[in-house]
Amino acid sequence: MKKIKIDAFRLLERVKKEKPLVHHLTNWVTIYDCANIVKVLGASPVMAHAKEEVGEMAGIASSLVLNIGTLTVDFVEAMKIAARAANKKGIPVILDACGAGATALRNEKSFELLRECRIDILKGNASEISRIAGEDVRTKGVDAAQTKNNLVQTAKALSKEWGCVVVVTGKEDIVASKDKFYLIKNGHPRMSEVVGTGCMATSVIATFAGVCRDLALAAVAGLVCFEISAECAAKKTSGPGAFKEKLFDCLYFLDKKAIDRMQRVEG
């Protein structure tokens, strides 16, 4: 692994210019923040979940987010309808396996979505991704639990198994595809003190994926922009409430100079 520079600002500019429509079937706890973070980037969020309209909505979207944070059986059925419509259109589908490893239902529905739809980007924290990989791990609700496996090897193996980009978020983020691998070392510990930063990261990734066919690069660029903004917000605040508010502002005003100077990516 060696330090590399990616042109994340170029993709950020594309987002602002093209304004992709990012369709969400997402976590009710964080839905407002997810919509806001997409809007801050200059894109358009839509939070449509009814079975009667999700297929039609996915048909006009640029990317699709599926987040099982507050799943029900009916909600997952709507996700399948939306994902199949997205697959038919050829837009990327991003699955956030939020809470996988916490209950049997979450495990079962994560695998159902992977088996029955084409998932283009699979995202989760260390324990969520480890559970999808088959490790006997118990996620602490939606917070990461300790794992025993090598996350780099796990991400690469899952990418090969499911034919998708795999994103593992944590102190260092891992992005793996069949032929590419990245390590992102941006971010700030305060992100773990605010509910919703993981879900927001998924929405950011989906936004960048809506304008870039190289989905691994889109994931890296999105995380770099989001996590540099978190670093900037942490410098300007002293507590989690103010940090969350400032995070939106820092992402909104993020410029090329800051991205090029602050990004810490290996590949």
Image: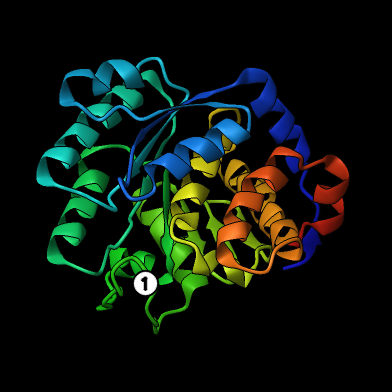
Q: Is residue 85 above or below residue 229?
A: above
Relative image position of residue 229 (x, y in whole percent): 70, 52
Classify mark 1: helix, strand or loop.
helix
Q: Residue at x 23, y 18 (%)?
A: 53
Quarter holding the C terminus? bottom right
Quarter holding the N terminus? bottom right
Q: Residue at x 53, y 56 (%)?
A: 176
Q: Residue at x 68, y 66 (%)?
A: 185
* Residue 19 seen in render: yes
* Residue 120 seen in render: no
Relative image position of residue 126 (x, y in whole percent): 43, 70
Residue at mark 1:
127
Depth order, front residue of 49/56: 49
Q: Residues within 10 Å of mark 1 (few under 14, many from 20)?
A: many
Q: Amino acid at mark 1?
A: Ser
Q: Is residue 3 left or right of residue 136?
A: right
